[in-house]
Amino acid sequence: MNHLPVLPVLLPMFAGAWLAMTTGGGRGSHRLLSLMATLLQIPLAAALIYRAGGGISVYALGNWPPPFGIVLVVDRLAALMLLTTAVLAVAALLYALRGDDEEGKSFHTLFQFQLMGINGAFLTGDLFNLFVCFEILLIASYGLLLHGSDRLRTRAGLSYVVLNITGSALFLIALGIFYGGVGTINMADLAVRIAGVPPPDAPLFGAAGALLWTAFGLKAAAFPLHFWLPRAYAAAAAPAAALFAVMTKVGIYAILRVDTLIFNRGAGVLAMFAHDWLWAAALITITLGAVGALAARNIGALVAYLVLSSVGVLLAAVVLGSREALVAGLYYLIHSTWISGALFLLAGVIARARGPAVAGLLIPGPPLGRPWFLSGLFFAGAVAVAGMPPFSGFLGKALLLAAAGDGPPALGLYTAVLGGGLLILIALSRAGSTLFWRQTETAAPGGTPDPVRLGAAVLLLAAAPILVIGAGPILAYLDGAAGQLLSPAVYIAEVLPHLTAPSGGSP
Amino acid sequence: MEALFAIMIGTLTAGGVYLLLRARTFPVIVGLTLVSYAVNLFLFSMGRLQTGVPAVIGQGESYADPLPQALVLTAIVIGFAMTAFALALALRSLGEEGTDHVDGKDAEEGT
């Protein structure tokens, strides 16, 4: 058996455990180990993407056969999410190495465990294991959120922790209903059995599904469960906030996975479960994100609201559910993860250069070092995230709008996406002109921005043109990923070969 | 037994939700604990309620489903860790803010 699929989970686990145990070790060796472990994620993810091109591969942990054992499933979507996370993590870590990791204890340990949880959530084919991975990434994120803490972070952290513990409780109740009702929590097996549920029992599983959407919606920060996001993300340190840019995507990924696999068109009474509600939530999230961006008084909060708006766009793509919409959604997912990560890092650089007195507040501050370069980066990021040509945000939104067709859903989506885009553009122009043009006479206390920190932001911002230039092969890959998502029978056959094997075999 | 069990889970959940909606951190954390108790009991009961049967196949006439027991053990450990973390955070918040109001402000001080 090829052990490649489990490595993206094991590598950060061992690295994190080693870092936790050697607290007396030197700062340099910790940084080196953390950086190496994170860098290694990129070739691992690339190898998995290469393998996923050949079909879905299943890894049974401990060689216990599914549905009794826990499986990791690598399809094109999972491999893609791994690569997206790996690139984001490298940039966030590079930024943190310039001093942010020293502001509190155990930054690198938490960072590695966070990666472990995120990667595990993308790979797992088991609903309970998904819960465990959620908890791992959450408890690491609590630590990262409070890293180098001040009062604002503690306050934001408390509501974030309480909300997520409550969300986990709802997730567990849903799991209990599924297990009690059909006797399995393997996702592929669940898909088979939910499709065969008699109509009188359907409301029970509908309730479980609603609880799942609530738990995932809370992770994804979809309306009306979004209130925690701006406060928490705006309060977090820049590298932690950048890494958090992928955490909302974990929620979106979970919704996408469960929606296409379990509540798909073939699921009988429960087919397309609660799509009307999710659609409304998506459109409201897009709008709220844009309005929030307009109202934000702090550059960190502004970027956090941009993340919120992108969550709405992704949710809309998931609910539309056609092949074209999924391709557009996945493209937008990569784009928004990297670009919002870049903007969080850039916001960190700017806040640092303006000094602690004004920091990220959108008020006139001291003139910045390297104004052309900084403002150029901000401009590029703003153009990309607002969905203006020529960058990736435009392409993603255009693909999604084209996929919406011309029915009534398209009307709502066009209004929300284009109106939201306009509001975001206004908010970003205002923020940019305040930051770079309206300046006081005092000298900047932060000095010139650190080149490595800027480099980390540039690394992620480079995705905006690269995603457009390489759009051909990327979209071809995503088309394959969407194809896999829309043919759950193949996924089920790979995970549970005995169900579909022509020779029969044991049930 | 099923009715008693269900009523107990319901009572725990109701109490937990009520406490979660309080404005002080300590009741909120007790609420979290109650909700996680209820959830753990609920998960446990998903293997069906039986008494005096082993969780191993072949040891007797019938057997109890071992999987929910494994699940609930995991859930207990995770819930315990999370509650401990929330408690530590609440204490720090109390120390830094000087109040245990969840928003970091007392109601009489203003909004």
Image (cartoon, grey):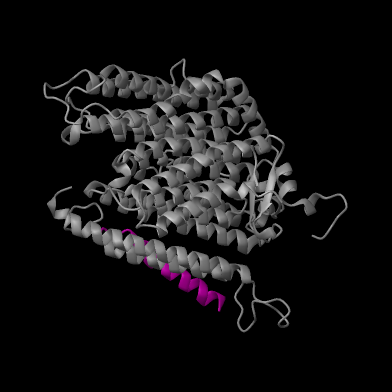
Closer to the camera in the image, A319 or A202: A319
Quadrant showing the C terminus of chain A: bottom right
Q: Is residue A439 magenta?
A: no
Residue B100 visible here: no
x and y, in percent, of residue A276 in the image: 53, 38
Residue at position x 58%, y 52% from top?
A: A206
Closer to the camera in the image, A55 or A156: A55
Residue at position x 53%, y 68% from top?
A: B72
Q: Which residues are magenta?
A: B1-24
Residue at position x 41%, y 60% from top?
A: A21
Which residue is outermost to the right?
A: A503
x and y, in percent, of residue A326 in the image: 59, 31
Which of the 4 image quadrants contains residue A43?
Answer: top right
x and y, in percent, of residue A480 in the image: 67, 31
Q: Is residue A233 above or below residue A336?
A: below
Closer to the camera in the image, A96 or A335: A96
x and y, in percent, of residue A24 in the image: 34, 57
Q: Is residue B6 magenta?
A: yes
Q: Is residue A387 above or below residue A277?
A: above
Please count the marks in the image: 0
Q: Is residue A351 above or below residue A227?
A: above
Residue at position x 29%, y 16% from top?
A: A372
